[in-house]
Image (spheres, grey):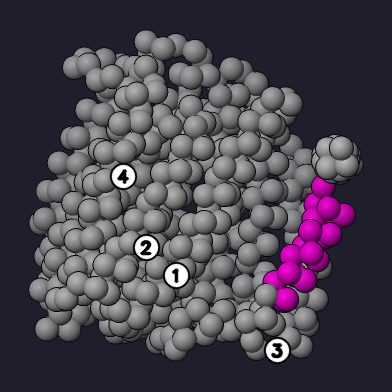
Amino acid sequence: MRSEDNKRIAKNTLFLYFRMLLTIVVNFYTVRVVWRVLGVDDYGIYNVVGGIVAMFAFLKTAMVASSQRFTSFELGRGDLDKLNRVFCISLKVHFLLAITVFLLTETIGIWFLNEKLNIPYDRMVAANWVYQCSIISLLVSIVSVPYDSCIVAHEHMKVYGYFGIIEVSLRLLMAFLLMAIGGDKLIIYSILMLGVALLMRLLSQFYCRKHFEECSYRNMSDKKLLRDMFSFSGWSFIGNFGVSVRSQGLNIIINMFFNVAVNAAKGIAEQIGAVVYGFAYNFQMALNPQITKKYASGDKSGMTELIFSGCKYSAILMMFIVVPLFFSADLFLHLWLGDVARYTVGFLQLILVTCLIDSMVGPITTGIQATGNIKKFQIIISIIMISNLPLAWLWLKIYSNPYVSSFIAIITSAIALAVRLRLLHQLVEFSYLVFIRHTLARIVPILVVVSVPSWIIYSKMPRTLCGLICYCIITTVIILICSYIIGLSAVEKKHVLQIIKNRLKFLSK
């Protein structure tokens, strides 16, 4: 990678991590407050009902990939007029998409909510309020996609980070308001979260219109661009439908076999899993525009180098959270929430394993999407992801244990990762040996070497907050040492040492 690209990625990553660290602290406290105010059953209802709406969010996710890909591609080519065309067509498409989602959620979705879900009768009114607020929030986020895509494509990660801080701060404020306002807490919480979504939509639109020339809407038609975007997003719909089915469909399957308390347990575990995955996602968000831009400029070797490095660093970053949290899950949950629903610890540990596998997916997927040739990729990945539902349903019929769904998710994640790598190889030729030597041969040994002492140390630590903090610090030091010795190449080690020397010289002045 070129020096200026490294600096840009590093700078953007730092901004995103600053945002993420603050987000983690605020989110954990917010969830603690909401958990205690709503209670186990209402929290479970919010999780499973919101999951129905999230099932339809695959339409939005597909268009996010399309908007970001075409915006980053045109930025890489430096065509401002085409960039404006991409924005205008994208905005028009997203309004049409919002109308489609509205029709689907208000027909199929509302029927499923009232007829198929296992929700206590006396909470159905509240569940419908949650559902309607979730729908409006989704529609707002859909029409915000073209603006968010511009911020990411232009690599204004500092602003993206500030927006994230504002959003979590508002969520914290809403949690405090939830305690102060009387009435049905579940309904009030849904309305407050909708208010946050509306405000964030206005902020992103205002910023983009002020800072990016292409974000001025003109009523235009470009049949070729529209066809290209729909072709790209059309196949993305298929792939993202599979991902949505796995993440949200499994919650619905669990609800059909168990009660909302089990949904609450899985919901808490998924909340933590989403935060953990953010460690890799924030790094990848800074990396992904560069992958697309390098492909657009014809630098395929530079693109594959970025992808391999992205997979390795994402997995290593993930280990800093996954390893200590995996072994201390019971203590962490007890100190954070007090008494938690049954199955929460097991769900969290299994989700952490899935997060570690999925941490390597982002750079490979971005590389495939950069080529624009995604038909085969999306069909195969969708089939793999959708297979989670029938497999989970079948095994729950045979072996009534809610963990079954998470075990199946781990297996399909590993298969999907291997398939993505194979498909990328077909589109952009590279050596599997280079990937194995540069990435897997470094990640796996680090995980094995780190896990054994981490487990032994935790077994000896006192079950207190101070004990947990000491354990996390020791484990972090072990991972740092192992990552440096095993994870970095000779060139990377030299670069790290040079950065440390420069910092020491600066501090000694």
Q: Compared to 412, does 461 lie above or below?
A: below
Residue 340 lies in what quarter of the image?
Answer: bottom left
Eye-nearest disc, 3 or 2? 2
Q: Which residue is more in the foreground, 95 or 304?
A: 95
Q: Residues at badges 3 and 1 in contact (C-beta under 8 Å)? A: no
Q: Position of residue 210 (x, y in %)?
A: 34, 23
Residue type at mark 4: give it.
Met
Q: Mark 4 or 3 closer to N-term?
A: 4
Q: Residues at badges 4 and 3 in contact (C-beta under 8 Å)? A: no
Question: The N terminus is located in which quarter?
Answer: top right
Q: Compared to 327, does 82 lie above or below?
A: above
The chief SS type of the magenta part is helix
Q: Residues at badges 2 and 1 in contact (C-beta under 8 Å)? A: yes
Q: Is residue 287 left or right of residue 340?
A: right
Q: Mark 2 or 1 closer to N-term?
A: 1
Mark 2 and mark 1: Cα distance apart in space: 8 Å
- The residue indicated by pointer 4 is 200
Residue 172, disc: 2
Q: Secondary structure at mark 4?
A: helix
Residue type at mark 3: give it.
Pro
Residue 462, disc: 3
* Magenta residues, start to end: 470-489
Residue 80 lies in what quarter of the image?
Answer: top left
Q: Secondary structure at mark 3?
A: loop
Residue 29, disc: 1
Mark 4 and mark 3: Cα distance apart in space: 43 Å
Q: Does residue 273 appear anywhere in the picture?
A: yes
Mark 4 and mark 1: Cα distance apart in space: 21 Å
